[in-house]
Amino acid sequence: MVKINFVDPAGTTRSVDVDAGATVMEAAIRNAIPGIEAECGGACACATCHVYVDAAWQEKVGAPTPMEEDMLDFGYDVRPNSRLSCQIKVTAELDGLVVTTPERQA
């Protein structure tokens, strides 16, 4: 199991365990993380699973694909560390990953 830490805009952290191979979005939905709507179900067709990747984790998570960047254009308060959580595949290397949810989704 891999631990993912979700921080809400108020600074409250919720840690969840997820199997490698799932996405960060799937971990959020399965654990009822507030602030992740995932309206498209993980198809990279909306921006309602937008998160900010903690600076310490950005290199391990990697950059968004061009398709993901296009979808992020529809996100709320997009920043350089913005990612769609449906596009972050959980691996053992991401154990302890910290992501923050925006104040609202697009």
Image (cartoon, grey):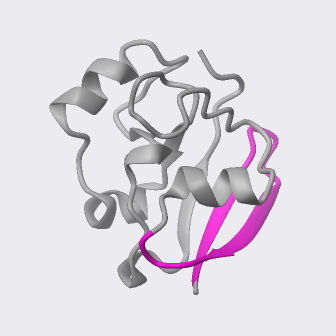
In this view, the residue farthest toward the left is 66
Image height check: is 94 above or below 6? Answer: below
Q: Residue at x 45, y 23 (%)?
A: 78
At horizontal 55% and vertical 37% (from top left) the residue drawn is 41
Left or right: 98 as drawn, with respect to 56? right
Q: Is 55 above or below relative to 4?
A: above
Give x and y (percent) for residue 27. Answer: 63, 60
Residue closer to the observer: 33 or 41: 41
On-image quarter of the N terminus:
bottom right
x and y percentages locating residue 29 in the rendered image: 70, 50
What x and y, as percent, mark residue 30? 72, 58
The answer to which of 93 and 21 lies nearer the viewer is: 21
Side (left or right) of 13 relative to 25 = right
In the rendered structure, the answer to whether residue 40 lies left or right of residue 59 reads right
- Please tell me in which quadrant of the rendered image residue 9 appears: top right
Which quarter of the rendering shows the C terminus? top right
Figure disc tally: 0
At a point 55% along the width and 77% down the height, the residue shown is 96
- Residue 30 vertical position relative to residue 93 in the rendered view, above or below: above
Tell me, yes or no, whether the highlighted magenta stretch contains residue 19: yes
Q: In screen coordinates, is 14 left or right of 77?
A: right
| The one of 103 and 43 positioned closer to us in this rendering | 43
Magenta residue check for 3: yes
Residue 69 appears at what percent x and percent y? 27, 27
The main secondary structure of the magenta stretch is strand
In the image, the segment drawn in magenta is: 2-21
